Amino acid sequence: MKVTFEKRLIDAPPQVVTFVLEQHLALRKRYSYVLDLLHGREQTMWAGTASHPLGALLWKPYDDGRTWWVDFACTHPDARSKGIYLLLRSRLVARARRDPMVRTIESHVATWNTRMQDLNKKVGATQCSVRFRYAVRGV
Ligand SMILES: CC(C)(COP(=O)(O)OP(=O)(O)OC[C@H]1O[C@@H](n2cnc3c(N)ncnc32)[C@H](O)[C@@H]1OP(=O)(O)O)[C@@H](O)C(=O)NCCC(=O)NCCS
């Protein structure tokens, strides 16, 4: 997930997040063939219904299927802190365990996204890389 997008999603009003969740799924469907060619097959896990989405998690395999990269994770603001992300994540882990190729599940989390940082630690994920940013112009 792009850092600016991640930042906006945290405080976005409920109706905006509903729209994002719906559009995200629609777009991914439309472009799935191209994405499959470029990055490998992208897959989605949902909570709620298509007309009333509560949360979504998108991932795709990398490194010949040894790593599953989580591209997008979001819970609708009205449904946060009810265990939806943890439910989707546990389903993802169960699915990964059924696939003998998969070794790790990875994602990028911005340093200021303390909620997601804490959740990652809570489920036993370890931090394994640091992103460097070089400002071409003054910040
Ligand atoms: C980060 C994010 C996806 C978390 O989703 P969530 O569905 O609210 O997370 P969960 O409810 O599964 O877990 C959060 C808390 O609920 C608690 N919980 C779990 N099951 C629960 C249940 N049945 N009832 C009540 N609380 C529960 C968890 O213990 C956890 O507690 P904590 O916050 O004290 O650690 C959500 O805040 C979000 O969409 N943020 C904006 C987008 C974003 O930052 N995405 C990540 C980019 S990397």
Image (spheres, rainbow, N blue to C red):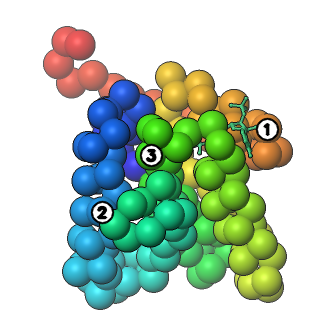
Q: Residue at x 65, y 43 (%)?
A: 82
For disc 2, the marked residue is 22
Quarter holding ligand 1 = top right
For disc 3, the marked residue is 76
Is 133 situated above or below 105? Answer: above
Question: Residue 128's x, y, as percent?
Answer: 69, 43
In this view, the residue in front, 25 or 118, is: 25
Instruction: Specify whether 105 is left or right of 79.
Output: right
* Quadrant in which residue 98 is drawn: bottom right
Ligand 1 closer than 8 Å to label 3 CB? yes
Q: CA distance from mark 3 to mark 2?
A: 11 Å
Q: Please name which of the two marks, 1 or 2, marks the residue nearer to the observer.
A: 2
Question: Residue 3's x, y, as percent?
Answer: 37, 37
Judge whether residue 40 can be spotted in this image: yes
Of all residues, the one furthest to the top in this rendering is 138
Counting residues from the N terminus, which is met first, the one under dot 1 or under dot 3? 3
* Quadrant in which residue 15 is drawn: top left
Is the residue under label 3 in contact with that under label 1 (CB below 8 Å)?
A: no
Where does the C terminus fall, quadrant-wise?
A: top left
- Mark 3, secondary structure of its residue: loop
- Mark 1, secondary structure of its residue: helix
Is 5 situated above or below 35? Answer: above
Label 2 neighbour load within 10 Å: few <14, some 14-19, many 20+: some
Ligand 1 closer than 8 Å to label 1 CB? yes
Label 3 neighbour load within 10 Å: few <14, some 14-19, many 20+: many
For disc 1, the marked residue is 122
In this view, the residue in front, 64 or 59, is: 59
Q: Residue at x 17, y 18 (%)?
A: 137
Q: Residue at x 44, y 69 (%)?
A: 49
Kind of residue sitting beneath label 3: His
